[in-house]
Image (spheres, rainbow, N blue to C red):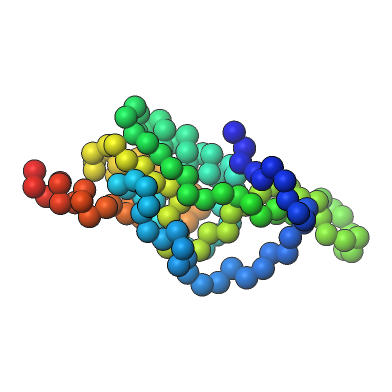
Amino acid sequence: MFLQPRKVKWRKQRRGSHKGFAYRGNKLAFGEYGIQALDRFYMTQRQIEAVRVTLVRSLKKGAKIWIRVFPDIPYTKKPNEVRMGGGKGDPEFWVARIKPGRILFEFTGVPLEVAQEAWRLADSKLPVKTRLVVAPEVLEKEGKK
């Protein structure tokens, strides 16, 4: 399952600005747990799929997973050993521009220990540091036990 847009208005885009922090998509919206990026990077469709597979395998049945990022930016590259000039390269793959604070994945339906282990496994698939965000009601429930 490769994520990419069905149709785009322009085949190639400029890289643009990548500074600042995530003011949208930085809070839990669906699940009890979230994986939050702590640094900026371009997340490829292959990285998204690798983390998704890892979460599905580690969380087992009963868990629901939400992917909160979508790779909608074409990333172009020129072939190796090509001389300078000759225009912009062809689109190689699709990326999602991630800023610090962005929630990448959310999941629910598992205990805290299982969620921490799933986060540890998913974190190893990404090139930046992440953290596990836990909803306040889960912490209250865990504290009462």
Q: Is residue 78 visible?
A: no
Is residue 104 visible in this depiction of the protein?
Answer: yes
Residue situated in front as seen by the camera: 11 or 88:
11
- The residue furthest left is 144
Quadrant assignment for the C terminus: top left
In terms of image quadrants, where is residue 47? top right
Q: Is residue 82 left or right of residue 102?
A: right
Residue 55, placed above or below residue 34: above
Is 104 above or below relative to 100? above
Q: Position of residue 25 (x, y in %)?
A: 45, 59
Extreme residue in the top direction: 61
Residue 1 as seen in the image, left or right of residue 92: left
The image quadrant that residue 65 belongs to is top left
Q: Quadrant of the N terminus?
A: top right
Q: Is residue 16 above or below residue 77?
A: below
Residue 56 lies in what quarter of the image? top left
Can you give x and y, in whole percent of width and height, for residue 136 in the image?
22, 55
**Residue that appears at 23% across and 39% down:** 111
Residue found at x 41% / y 61%:
26
At a point 35% along the width and 29% down the height, the residue shown is: 60
Residue 133 position within the rendered picture, expressed as x and y whole percent measured from the top left: 32, 54
- The residue lying at 37 percent from left, 47 percent from top is 30
Q: Please say if 6 is above or below 63.
A: below
Locate residue 91 relative to residue 64 in the image: left or right. Answer: right
Image coordinates of residue 33 in percent, x first then y, are: 32, 48
